[in-house]
Amino acid sequence: MWTGLMPDNTSRMSIRGERIYHITSCATWSEYMVSDANYILKVDPTIDRAHASFISCGFSTGFGAAWKEANVESGSTVAVFGLGAVGLGAVIGAKLQGASRIIGIDTNENKREKGEAFGITDFINPGDSDNSASELVKELTGGMGVDYSFECTGVSTVLTESLEATKIGTGKTIVISVGAEPILPVGLFAILHGRTLKGTLFGGLKAVSDLSIVAEKCQKKEFPLQELFTHEVTLADINKAFELVKQPNCVKVVINMS
């Protein structure tokens, strides 16, 4: 799936005769496209199209990580590093699983309100303290750390912090984000102390059996997805979206293709 080609080693896209590639065997931002049926979910036509785009990736990846990959246990404690769309998905996934405490960590103070809308019980801005993020998490959990942590930033130094924030012996960290570096350093002692590190792609969701459940919850408005919708641009102005995502109040930019 990393070749940019379909399973039959062809690409169904071209620009002026030049072959272009499908990311992870899918293709989006196109008006018409041949796609693998395994990656397609037909949704109710009355669904909010912006919300449908949010659950097609990002938010659902975080939600699935808490629901399917970590299988967060009721009454457990959770830390989510990075409160973008992926992190907010992990927050509400943990909440619906019954987590008793959900700590959101982000250097952007604007994310406190967004996190609260999705279910965080505590917010940490590491920039407000000389202590590390993992130390701040432990301060909130009686020095023990949390049962589960979710790394949703893609920042290499945060990986070890997310591990250190979990309990010795039983803590579990799910890496969701994709950063610019393909190889990341991991603190050796964070692993030697018995913690578990696991990665996930699309939160472990399957398009038909799992994403259909997410879509149903979306239809029933069980997720405050309107909180993700902060900006909208036309397809002609798509390049503006790259500038908008740098703004501290931006979560998701919707590309209106009509």
Image (spheres, rainbow, N blue to C red):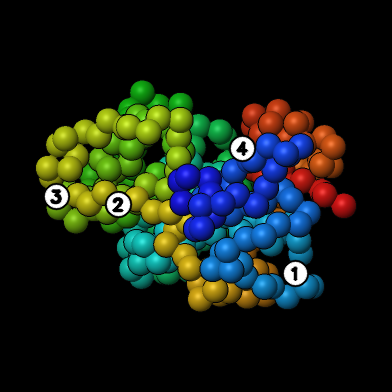
Distance between the alpha carbons at the discs numbered 2 and 3: 13 Å
Residue where numbered disc 3 is placed: 194
The quarter of the picture where residue 73 lies is bottom left
Residue where numbered disc 4 is placed: 110
User: Which kind of residue does numbered mark 1 sit on?
Assistant: Ile
Q: Is residue 61 left or right of residue 170?
A: right
- Crowd tier of the residue under label 2, counting other residues whose Cα lies within 10 Å: few below 14, some 14–19, many 20 or above: few
Mark 4 or mark 3: whose residue is earlier in sequence: 4
Q: Residue furthest right?
A: 258
Q: Is residue 105 visible?
A: no
Q: Is residue 45 visible?
A: yes
User: Which kind of residue does numbered mark 4 sit on?
Assistant: Asn
User: Which kind of residue does numbered mark 2 sit on?
Assistant: Lys
Mark 3 or mark 1: whose residue is earlier in sequence: 1
Distance between the alpha carbons at the discs numbered 1 and 2: 33 Å
Secondary structure beneath label 4: loop
Q: Residue furthest top?
A: 130
